[in-house]
Amino acid sequence: TDTGGSIRIPASFCGVVGLKATYEAFDRRGCLPLGFTFDHVGPLANTVDDCALLFRTLVRDSPRVGLKGLSIGLAEHAFFDRLDPLVRFSVRQAVQSLAAMGAVVHEVTLPDVDLLGGIGRFVMMAELASIWGGKVTEADVAPDVYAGIDNGSRIEATEYIAAQRARNALSREFRKVWDHVDLLLTPTTPTPAPLIGATQLEIGGVTEEIRVATTRFCRPFNVLGWPALSMPCGSTPQGLPIGVQLVGPPHGEESIFAAAYALETVKPYRIAEKPVGQ
């Protein structure tokens, strides 16, 4: 399940493929809720083909889409700032590969992605508190989850409604991008996997709290409800995987798979059978 990146971020950090399908494409009954208007379900798999097979079996088997002529948008201002240089290099290579195979790459301008993510965090805390407030103690859950519940319990109903109205208005502006392109392409995360226990990341001279940093490129698409897939597009010299994210309009999973299939043939990548260096 993925509320702010919890399918795509581990996919990126572990060198596998993860799809956050369109909001409510998968039945969420039986899933432990976190933010009920953000929670998405989707498969994690070792290949794009396996990921697509799971999606088509469990949700929808739609006509296939080809890569040639598919229009892919890059939002430089929103997703290519404050990046690890190796991530930028690998994602650029992925873009070049797709263009060489027949995709048409465009620069696009999006509304304020950081504002959308901030609205998402605010609304999610209110929903988290509404689900779990008074039902769990500090000993029951991770400290960051409890802090979210505690902060969310202080949000008033009028503030929640105002944030949802702002979310809807901004979402209408974001939807206009689909008048120009079929997909968006972004890095999945701004860095490869951080060290266990790290609480902050420094990227481009800016220090960020690690949860905010790692969800920066993923959370906006939970707020919008759009399908998004992370897949490997390279690795660091130390063997840490680097992920690229392909995003489509609602129910645009087949277009995502078309680009992902093509990219996988150019840059095949599998999980090492044993940890690097052993």
Image (cartoon, helix red, strand yellow):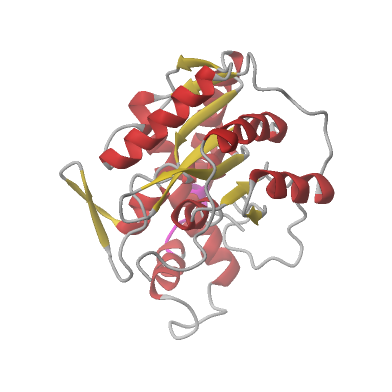
**In this picture, residue 41 sits left or right of residue 274:** right
How many numbered callouts? 0
**In this picture, residue 61 sits left or right of residue 35:** right
Between 93 and 186, the residue placed more toward the observer is: 93
Q: Quadrant of the C terminus?
A: bottom left
Can residue 238 be seen here? The reply is yes
Q: Is residue 42 above or below residue 172?
A: below
Q: Which residues are magenta?
A: 154-160
Magenta residue check for 111:
no
Between 10 and 91, the residue placed more toward the observer is: 91
- Position of residue 64 measured from the top left corner of the image (x, y, whole percent): 78, 28
Q: Residue furthest bottom?
A: 139
Between 163 and 189, the residue placed more toward the observer is: 189
Q: Is residue 187 above or below residue 26?
A: above
**In this picture, residue 145 sits left or right of residue 180:** left
Between 193 and 129, the residue placed more toward the observer is: 193
Q: Residue at x 71, y 50 (%)?
A: 50
- Position of residue 267 measured from the top left corner of the image (x, y, whole percent): 51, 38
Q: Quadrant of the N terminus?
A: bottom right
Q: Residue furthest front?
A: 278
Q: Residue at x 67, y 35 (%)?
A: 257
- Position of residue 29 measured from the top left corner of the image (x, y, whole percent): 76, 62
Q: Is residue 216 above or below residue 145?
A: above
Q: Residue at x 72, y 32 (%)?
A: 254
- Position of residue 147 measured from the top left corner of the image (x, y, whole percent): 39, 69
